[in-house]
Amino acid sequence: MSLPKINPTKTEAWKALEKHFQEIEERELQDFFSEDGDRAERLKIEWQDFYLDYSKNRITDETISLLLKLAEEVKLKEAINQQFSGDKINETEDRAVLHTALRDFDTMKAEVKATLQKMKSFSEEIINGNHKGFTGKAITDIVNIGIGGSHLGPEMVTEALQFYKNHLKIHFVANIDGDAVTEILNKLNPETTLFIIVSKSFTTQETIANAVVIKDWFLKYALRTDIKNHFVAVSVNEGGAKDFGISEENIFPMQNWVGGRFSLWSSVGLSICCAVGFNNFEAMLKGAFEMDNHFKKENFGNNIPVVLALISIWYNNFFKAESEAVVAYSQYLNKLVPYLQQAVMESNGKSVDRSGEKIAYQTGTIVWGNVGSNSQHAYFQLLHQGTKLIPTDFIGFSESLHGNVENHNILIANFFAQTEALWEGTHNKSVENAFKLFEGYKPTNTLLIKKLTPKNLGSLIALYEHKLFVQGIIWNIFSYDQWGVELGKTVAKGTLNAIENNDISNLKNDSTKNLIKQVSLFQK
Ligand SMILES: O=P(O)(O)OC[C@H]1O[C@H](O)[C@H](O)[C@@H](O)[C@@H]1O
């Protein structure tokens, strides 16, 4: 069954929200807390190790109830059921969207179980040193060669779970930038390195080109027959991997119904498994599964991904906020934002609705940010006193993993203080001049999580996956395709041709022609 095609702006709820927005816009900041005694008590959701406080938002109970009505009118519940039951909701690619099936411990598909088993035994052999390189030595370094979804998820998670890491060193080669590849190769010993080529399609230009460079480098030291101990592949395209020279038993399959940016739960997560061990990987899957159940079963008003998605829609479409920030008060989460940027912006950066019509409202939030407290000393000035409204998600953990309580208290104090300062500003305080005035009223969601465990990380990532899905449903767009990345790839082929053959005559654009000419001049 196809997804409903409902223009959100034509719903009753949207019209009511527009009216309601006028009232909210005129309200003074103090109204929200002072006239609403148990606001902080009410506008929160407690779920497992998660505590979401969304009271510091420009919302009232009426806002929430109208947003919930919007979710109902666009048939969100039905859409969620369609996704989980494997309907081909990625219509433009004629595919189901089932990354949730990779972590469905109730009814796990046999093929998913088999892949997990293969990942388990392989990663165990690597970790315990039974798997030997071509000179009989154990593996010490692992290189994940992949880009986009075949890079950002594994890198974000291995970084986030550093505390749980074993002795293996994990490296990521993503960029086609040859200097970056060389920098990594310079650190490696071919005798003790395992290369994991990760590409769902096994046709991605960067990944295949980098894999070729790396294979050539390896073959300077080893024989072709040694490849089987040092190269494995993760792909849907078994033929492509075999043609590259990967032996059949070294191919970790993945399914077409797993989108690249949602694939860290699949065999794309092999580097994660090697880095932190299968048990931790599985715990992460279980955390995601718990969040899936919360998302599927909980009333929307008490449903973390749904509430966060609705609040984000409120700012994006009514306040016309251009972007939103995510600031995690944990150095471990320093790769969360780049990961979310692909997940959110590749999914929801669309301007055509599900009927193929041009959209007349804003979709696709711009996500940016970095870790706290570092960000406070960089761009927080703009959050506090800039002209733009930037709703921000603050994420933090109540426990320090290494037990550095002193620092952790300072970290948490800053985490909470910033959301308060952003909201309260210098309201009711006397300030010397306009430069020192903080208008306040800057909205934040505070997500406090007990501890950074693999399980909680899994829940956190799944939360954002569901949030973006909810937004895509409301905006009436297809979140699971990414046609917008194709044109650049085609143009790059022509450009490369021109550069390699030193012939710009077939190029269309004069600016590009000049740039290529300039490269030759610089290279002389
Ligand atoms: O895994 P691959 O097939 O190599 O794809 C890698 C990436 O490339 C594409 O350009 C898509 O935009 C991404 O969604 C994808 O994750």
Image (spheres, rainbow, N blue to C red):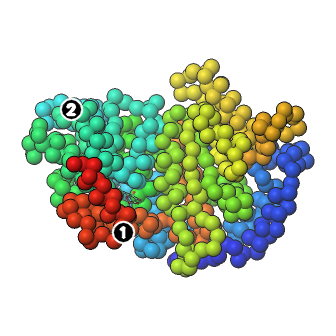
- At a point 43% along the width and 68% down the height, the residue shown is 483
Eyeballing the image, is 107 above or below 38? Answer: below
Q: Type of residue at label 1? A: Asn
Which of these two is toward me, 206 or 491?
A: 491
Q: Which amino acid does label 2 sit on?
A: Asn
Q: Is mark 1 within 8 Å of ligand 1?
A: no
Q: Give residue 196's position: percent from left, percent from top.
A: 28, 46
Q: How crowded is mark 1: few (under 14 residues within 10 Å), some or many (20 or more)?
A: few
Residue occupying image coordinates x 61% and y 47%: 325
Disc 1 on helix, strand or loop?
loop
Query: Residue 4 shows which numbered tag?
Result: none
Mark 2 surroundings within 10 Å by alpha-carbon count, few (fewer than 14), some (14 through 19), many (20 or more): some
What is the count of numbered marks? 2
Residue indicated by mark 2: 189
**In-image side of 487 versus 67 (left or right):** left
Q: Distance between the residues labelled 1 and 2?
A: 44 Å
| Residue 455 to residue 293: above or below | above
The residue where tag 1 is placed is 509
Picture quadrant where residue 355 is located:
bottom right
Q: Is residue 86 left or right of residue 61?
A: left
Q: Nearer the viewer, residue 281 or 68?
A: 68
Earlier residue among tags 1 and 2: 2
Residue 151 in the image, given as x and y percentages of width and height:
38, 48
